[in-house]
Amino acid sequence: MRLRLLAAVLLVLVAPLSALDGDPRIHDPSTVVVHDGRFYTFGTGNGLPISVSDDGWTWRRAGTLMQAIPEGRPSPEVIARGGNNTWAPDVIRSGDKYFVYYSAPGTQPKAAIGLLVGRTLDPNSPDYKWEDRGPVVWSDGVEDSNAIDPGVFRDPTKGSLWLTYGSYFGYIRLVQLDPKTGQRLHPDARPVNIAINSEASIIIYRDGWYYLLLTHGSCCAGANSSYNIRMGRAKNVTGPFVDNMGIDMLQGGGKLFLSSGGRYIGPGHFGLLDLGDGVQKFSCHYEADLDRGGVSVLDIRPLMWRDGWPVAGDNFKEGTYQIESVRTGTALELAVQGMPVGGLRGRGGRGGRGDAVPTEVISAQNAADVAASWPAGPINLRLSPYMVQAQQKWTITPVANVGGYPGSPYFKITIAGTNRALAATEDRDLVTLPAFTGGPEQLWRIDQLTDGTYRVMPKSVPNSKDPLALSAAGSSTATLDRFSADSDRQRWLLKTP
Amino acid sequence: MLRLIILAVLGSAGLFSSASAQTATPRSPAPTLAAPKSPAKAPGADGFIQRWLILEPIPMKGQLTDTAVQTAVKTDYFPNQFTVMPQHADTVTVSGSELRWHAVDTSGYNVNLYHFAYALGKPTSNVLFWAVTVVNSPREMPDIRLAIGSNAASVWWVNGKEVIGIYNDRQTVIDDGVSRSLTLQKGPNIVRAAIINGGGATDFCARFLDREYRPIKDITVSLADRQ
């Protein structure tokens, strides 16, 4: 009975690996934005459903945007230009206001994109209110355009605001917006065609390039959806956006950014979530999460960059790893005397003695083999050349019901084969404790950075409010320091032993 | 006055003249080491401490594991070995052999112990070196770290407290071992090291770093403050 109870406790403590926690159901999510420490996104559905999260990991539904406008539905002008559906919004902060652009299709391709303006995303704020400022762009049902799926972009080089939109009927189009009003800056100018045969477009910027990300394939067929995210880039915001093979997106080009994988089918509706300090994530929805009955769900994943293109990263997965410093090439270990794998043995000459290639397979070194000589209490940490020794192998396991961060739950980091847990100390340093007890100083956030390396941060440090990260103070010394994106000191490789 | 006397001693004795006399064939002076010629010395451009008192090597097994090194450096070799602030040419007797302290300035970021011992006609392998210096701080400096590198294993103390140890066969890497945060007191602070070499080259380097890992350079090193 006692064993059964223990097993039950362990099951509760180990979090399932899935695309977000709580209620992540959504279709066509807007770019995830952070307001007063909370994460918000809005999706397709009656009144534009709101999804909110306190930490970016556990999500819940929180009513609809249209509940906060007097009519509870798109304005008559929007309905007249398009229809009374409310789909696929996007959101951006501009000055002291939020602009929400939403799709209001009638019988497609007759559609309009309306604008909601508010000062806060927090429904509990006394300032919480949305006003429908009418249609921004529309398609008349005849032209080569279907004015849905807005994506709004602020050009960081100029501060200008741009809106892309469109869906399969003809072109993806671009218009410039007035950052003060959210309406078109030049309403009489012809929209610029920038892509074709796609939807869910949005632009991001990095290092002199504008990237147009959009979705190819078919949506809305559950596990039979072929949605996938494609991209091209341009030196100007107005294009031409060209893919890695030199094909203009106006001719259907698009380098693959993300397609179906694992138990998730049909990713679409890219959104950039820039957390600063060189940490970027992206949001998307999958048309079907096979572990959630095939419904569409939100996900947040790391965004990396390679050879001038964005690359979709994967949220960190549990397993046993060596934790190697990018700066020093040395690995995190218990500060105990190591034992060579296979025990002390003669070198046998370079290449070994005798004529035959040895057939002996040296067994892996496990903690059970060597831990008898380790101290029973807290043990300090250090960095050392990696030699596959037991004190260097760490099992990283998600922990349930303790919250998380965008895209992932917190993890515990224990010496493989033991319950000895890595913890932050009140003097901003590191220690391992004999057993994991669930304290916030024993919970770790593992973010993949834009170069593919990892940042490892404790959920909290006793008596400190500073966000600290695992840091290679020296080739042999690990500690906690403020994260600096300009340094390799807090960048780590997590390798499978 | 005491300081002047010490400098006079250094100048007249020469750094390794007596050591050379211990060998059958006189050896060239250590190319990177010289007798101090000023009362105090500022760190180098990168903050490395370049003035040290080094005891002639103590022969030992040269085992470099954590426990072997800790046992070796905690063994009593001479009186007050964790507190003494010797002066150039002071001697101690270890296992019946008289060993001498030498004040040296290094021209590099590191102190080449192989040069040091070889020039003295002393063994360079399977040996323990003791090194000590006095860092004068113009003010109390909290939240700084001692950053060291050594070939091979070494253990370090600041004002009598052990602050960092690195073990096993290794080469000197700048900022290899970095202490936890410590405070340099205003005035003299004693930095002491024990370096054990198994075989081959042997050297060490040391500097203090601030909270942002920038080298601390507004300190001076002098060896004249007998405690």
Image: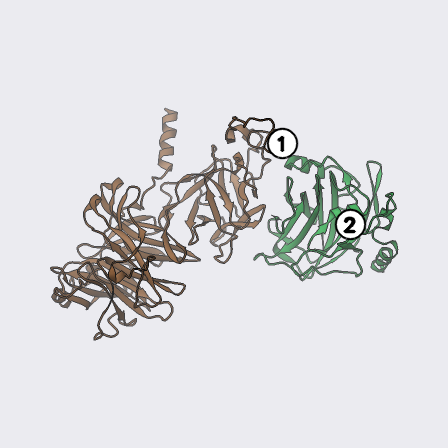
Label 1: chain letter: A
Count numbered badges in the picture.
Answer: 2
Crowdedness near tag 1: few (<14), some (14–19) or many (≥20) residues, C-alpha within 10 Å: few
Query: Residue B15's x, y, as percent?
Result: 83, 53
**Element on which disc 2 rests:** loop
- Amino acid residing under circle 1: Gly
Q: What tint does the image give chain B?
A: green
Residue at image x 22%, y 45%?
A295
**Residue lying farthest front?**
A355
Q: Is residue A460 above or below residue A36?
A: above
Residue A172 falls left or right of residue A346? left
For this rendering, which residue is in front, A14 or A242? A242
Q: What tint does the image give chain A?
A: brown
- Amino acid residing under circle 2: Met
Provide the residue designation for mark 1: A349
Toward which corner of the image does residue A222 lie, by quadrant?
top left
Real-space CA distance between mark 1 and mark 2, rounded to the nearest whole angstrom? 46 Å
**Element on which disc 1 rests:** loop
Provide the residue designation for mark 2: B85
Residue A200 falls left or right of residue A110? right
Would residue A72 be visible to someone looking at this image? no
Would residue A364 be visible to someone looking at this image? yes
Query: Residue A162's x, y, as percent?
Result: 29, 67
Query: Residue A401's x, y, as percent?
Result: 35, 42
